[in-house]
Image (cartoon, rainbow, N blue to C red):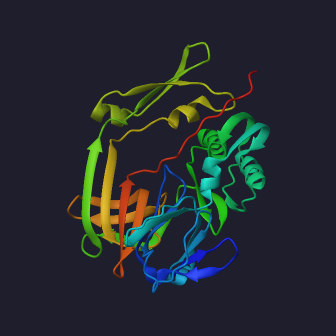
Amino acid sequence: MIKLIKQNGTIYDISKVCARYTWSGSSSQAARAFSFDYLNAPYDKTVQLPAVETGDFISFEYGAEGEVFYGQIFGIERSSQIGTITFTAYDAMKHFLESTGQYNFKNITAEAITLQVCADVQIPVRWLYPTGVVIKSMICNEMSLYDIIMAAYTKAHRITGDKYFPMIYKHGLGVYKAEWIVSGFTLSDKNNIFNSDITETMNSIKNQIKIYDDKGNQVGEVKNDGSISKFGIFSEAYTQEEGIDPQTGAKSKIHVLPKQEIKISALGDINCLSCYFVTITDGATGLSGRYWITSDTHTWENGVHKMDLSLRFDSLMDEREAEEEKA
């Protein structure tokens, strides 16, 4: 069910006049979007539909899952043409992306930073992965609130080695560890895959990280001999950061395998979302095992739910940087 929620609280069920609708997201864009093709007949007096206006809200409910999307229309267009107009709503992550803040954090965890940022924009918190890492200093000068949160979790990532991602769930913000997998579901060329493509490139390989101190002296090295033996040396420099173990920081830069770009079109499953792992068995491409979803687009049209997924072998983190207080 698709609901149009007006600013005055009036709710309209517009499901029957949306010929096609999509729900999408990606690991790099953060905010999930819901787009729908809405009937447009400005001169037909027999068609009485509520107008979609900037600031209206859209709720999308799907079967037993209930509400899976709640977002706001950030802009509209008007047309005299008879047909359909496509409107797009974005979830509350858009507020973090479009709002900026200025903070000077000291001796505080990424979780506490996120709590403060959420309080300042009055967005509820659903779950914050407990890193337990105390950040000595983080200076944020007119940074987007999204970048502030991810900069805090980036600092934690460089100590724990874990990867984290943010997501809006049930109107609130959650920050999770990138370890979830779509439960009880397999993408298979025998059951639900329509088409699959895979490309591979060595451009992202970094299998030797040289560690330097703040004076430019090399003080250590992290490398992967197996990757070097197979692909040759791809080196990168890493400068020590205050409060971060240099070996851990350098290891976070290691990428030992070629970058894979996998695209799959399949029958839709509502649980296949960006930043989740999903199991794949595909004889055509040889894909077998669990892969991480980097972007997802779910489309409903003529009663059929299809999805287009981009995937990769391992998870990513949307890393952001922030200044530190000079010693």
Residue nearer the viewer, 217 or 3: 3
The answer to whether 34 appears left or right of 320 in the picture is: left
Residue nearer the viewer, 103 or 100: 100
Residue 33 screen position, x and y as percent? 50, 62
Q: Residue at x 79, y 38 (%)?
A: 107
**Where's the C terminus, which quadrant?**
top right
Residue nearer the viewer, 64 or 176: 64
Q: Residue at x 36, y 82 (%)?
A: 303
Residue 218 vertical placement versus 167 (above, below): above
Q: How many marks?
A: 0
Q: Residue at x 74, y 54 (%)?
A: 121
Residue 29 vertical placement versus 217 (above, below): below
Query: Among all residues in the image, which is located at the extreme left?
Result: 284
Residue nearer the viewer, 146 or 292: 146
Q: Residue at x 73, y 62 (%)?
A: 124
Residue 110 screen position, x and y as percent? 70, 46
Residue 321 screen position, x and y as percent? 61, 35
Query: Among all residues in the image, which is located at the extreme bottom?
Result: 46
Question: Quadrant of residue 270 in the image?
Answer: bottom left
The answer to whether 115 appears left or right of 174 in the picture is: right
Residue 152 vertical placement versus 286 (above, below): above
Residue 307 screen position, x and y as percent? 36, 68
